[in-house]
Amino acid sequence: MTSAPERRPRAGALLLAALLALAGCGAKEVVVQGQFPEPLMSKLPLTLGVWYEPEFREHEFFDEAKGRAESDWLVRTGEAQVELWDTLLTGMFERVVPMDARPAPDQMNPAVDAVLIPRVDELQYAIPAQTNIKVYEIWMRYAFELVTTQGETIADWTMTAYGKTPTAFLQSDEAAVNLAAVVALRDAGAHFATSFTRVPEVAAWMEALNAPAPTASAEAAAGPEDGP
């Protein structure tokens, strides 16, 4: 029977081997950070509520290494997503109101014209073919819901965004991935700012929202319905 003292060195050797293996994998983590300027445009005369689902606020993607020469990647975009959309929407709309929960029937909500709910439906990225060329590409597909304060759908649509590291002369792979993600987020903001009012359901809703209410004289002129 093997004694306890004889087991300890073997266990220690196995632990050391595992730690060395993990170190050799070179797992890389990026918390995306960047600057997102407000759009240069006239603000829409709307009070917009915005609700970020927890999955959106904490959005990240993980890519497992396919071989010994590659690394695992964990890229966290959640904080940058919220920063981008807060900045963008504040620059696009007359007033932006953060919501405490997703709108639902019989729920007490702030007085807003509508509530926007963004989410990331899909994300893909491409790594450089050669590790000495630090050019990365990131592609994202967003889905948006515009709903009433009671949660009724006004419009829903999708939009894509793309980012590519504009230079190969960066100090690290992490910096290249971060920059590609920032470019993709800026691209998303630019597309949203220029396309929001072109979404057919959004355009129809805005037209109805701005339609003048019938005046008392117009209602009187219409008169009561004719009886039988």
Image (cartoon, rainbow, N blue to C red):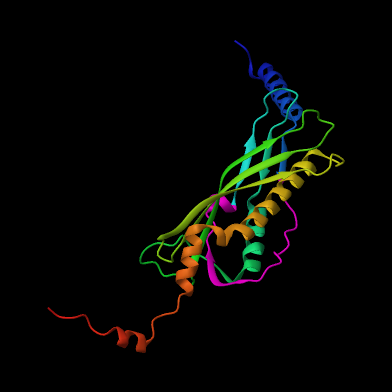
In x, y percent, where is residue 107?
39, 67
Q: In the shown orientation, is residue 149 left or right of residue 74?
A: left
Question: Where does the image place residue 112, in percent across and percent down from the top left?
Answer: 49, 71
In this picture, which residue range is highlighted in magenta? 31-57
Residue occupying the far left of the picture: 228
Query: Which of the pair 178/5 is nearer the observer?
Result: 178
Query: Residue 110, image x and y in percent?
Result: 48, 72
In this rendering, does residue 110 appear at all? no
Left or right: 156 as drawn, with respect to 226? right
Q: Is residue 46 magenta?
A: yes
Q: Nearer the viewer, residue 72 or 118?
A: 118
126 or 73: which is nearer to us? 126
Residue 172, can we see it?
yes
Left-right relation of 117 to 85: left
The outermost residue toward the top is: 1
Residue at 55%, 51% (x, y): give it. Answer: 119
The quadrant holding residue 186 is: bottom right
Q: Quadrant of the C terminus?
A: bottom left
Q: Is residue 85 above or below residue 68?
A: below
139 is higher (above) or lower (below) than 19: below
Percent position of residue 212, x then y: 45, 79
Residue 180 vertical placement versus 6 (above, below): below
Q: Is residue 29 one of those drawn in magenta?
A: no
* Residue at 83% in and 33% down: 133
Q: What is the tally of numbered marks visible in this picture?
A: 0
- For the N terminus, the image quarter is top right
In the image, what residue occupies the spot 44% across and 62% down? 103
